[in-house]
Image (spheres, rainbow, N blue to C red):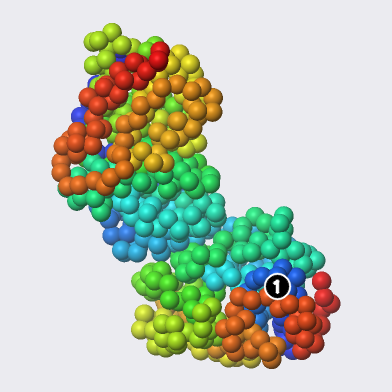
Amino acid sequence: MKKYIDSGNIDTRSGFGAGLVEAGRADSRVVALAADLKGSLKMDAFAAEFPERFIQCGIAEANMVGVAAGLSLTGKIPFCGSFAEFITGRVYDQVRQEVGYGRTNVKLASSHAGITLGEDGATHQTMEDLALMRAIPGMTVLVPCDYNQTKNATIAAARYEGPVYLRFGRPAVPNFTGADEPFEIGKVYVLNEGADVTLIACGHLVWEALQAAEALETEGIGAEVLNVATVKPLDAAAILASLRKTGAAVVAEEHNMAGGLGEAVAGVLAAEAPAPVEFIGGGDRFGQSGKPAELMAAYGLDAAHIAAAARKAIARKNR
Amino acid sequence: MKSTEELSNIASQVRRDIVRMVSAAGSGHPGGSMSSADFMTALYFRVMDQDPATWTRSAEGQDAFILSAGHLAPVYYAVLARAGYFEPALLGTLRKFGSKLQGHPAVDYVPGIFQPSGSLGQGLSAAAGIALGKKLSGEGHRAYVLCGDGESEEGQIWEAAMFAVHHKLDNLVAMTDWNGQQIDGPIVEITGIDELNEKWLAFGWDVIVADGHDFESILNAFELAKKADGKPKMILFKTEMGHGVDFMAGTHKWHGKAPNAEQCAAALAQLKETLGDY
């Protein structure tokens, strides 16, 4: 299979910070809003280069979302950022009314998503945000997989007209996609071709899926790996094309099983091409404190669990 | 420029429209709409630089208005229609299936509406964003926003209050329809948030208290609100819920209740038809 090289572990939120600066240089309408988490969101460089275009909102996320909507009505392109829980669950109603229903050109920058936020524990580890954001009509949901892709997705989000939810994370993770690979909203990236099973993943779990594919290859199993960096709108055609070839799938996400990528894929398959599917996700439980790798293993989100799920899906094919 | 007498006549028609719209719909919020009718008329017919002929949803190059208390949709729609944003005949379709007049303000249904509202406490933030955007662009126009006094129980209002002061948004003009009533009863009995002038002063705003049913007082308040002193403005319009119809006035019971046909006729007998009913 194609070998993916980790060019050096780095956090995806730094990809957002770098992409924000680039988007800001390309378009003077880009502004950034923080709710007392400028540093955590890696907005420092943008704020230093464009001090008038950085807007500190204090610990008041609800107001920040409304201000962002208002700014967009004056032609600005606002990126408003916080931890994933605080830019979704805390302000769901504001996002729904001011951004979703209002169809404002607001970009919700969502950092520290999922369980790999780590030590802070369950209050901060949202595993429900994709369900909330997917449910809002017209919301585009992006979950890039590494630093490079997060940077490029940020640039693409700035160019796109309409509400965007952009999810990324805290820990340093492998950086393996092309530095200059343009991000296409709505595109499924086929990272590896295989005939036996399709591994469908987003975010941090794309790298884990690639590791699982390598392990499966040594057993003679060909795993096709899809990087679904746009969770909504979902490229159903690309997923169906792969499933028609492989006949079995694993969907892997750093999110609870309710309402995330797994259910989105299952919905497509149930309607169009039923096939055995196994789900890798957080389950119906909250997170807890720990190191990212410990939590990934404990919650069944790592490469070993994905490979095991793939074997199970393949075994179910001929029942 | 409309005289205070002309404004008063328009407001009378707006109140007739409100009563007829809500009665025909069989549901809706007439009380706050009628308490807001006078200053909303002044805002659209005298104060704002906003032209129905050239209006777009972009807030650039014009004054903007956000109705934060979205349940006051009837007065909003009536004023927009009478100001020429759409045909007054549409008013009779309020809340009906397929209508351009949704139960609460929605964008892209009719011209004149910048943001949806209905879930309370959010419009002041959006207006602050518009005001800030205008500052960033070096543009002189203002952002206006109407909040309810009951709505001011929402925490987000005070988040926005701090934000607007910190960012020196003196081009933000907020209004409160201070009628003292909310759906469950008089505000003093619900949370006691009654000293609104002291609260807004404490948050660092320029506060203007005006008689919301006296056009001299209303216009004077809007004039005072143009002061470029680095502070956002809050005009507290002292009003009476249901103002204009004796049996609807001064009680929370008409916050969210539609008059039946008999009550509608009795109300209309008290409101002068000045521009022709739709």
Report the residue marked by disc 1.
B22
Q: Mark 1 Cα within 10 Å, few/some/many (few <14, many 20+)? A: many
Picture coordinates of residue A54, whole percent (x, y): 36, 56
Picture coordinates of residue B120, whole percent (x, y): 49, 68
Residue furthest to the front in view is A319
Whether residue A31 is visible here, answered yes or no, is no
Picture coordinates of residue B121, whole percent (x, y): 47, 69
Q: Residue at x 31, y 28 (%)?
A: A206
Picture coordinates of residue B15, whole percent (x, y): 72, 80
Residue furthest to the right in view is B276
Badge 1 marks a residue whose secondary structure is helix
Q: What quarter of the picture does the C terminus of chain B occupy?
A: bottom right
* Quarter of the rendering containing residue A209: top left
Residue furthest to the top in view is A220
Image side of residue B97 versus residue A7, left or right: right
Q: Amino acid at mark 1?
A: Val
Residue A101 lies, with reference to residue B127, above or below; the image says: above
Image side of residue A319 versus residue A111, left or right: right
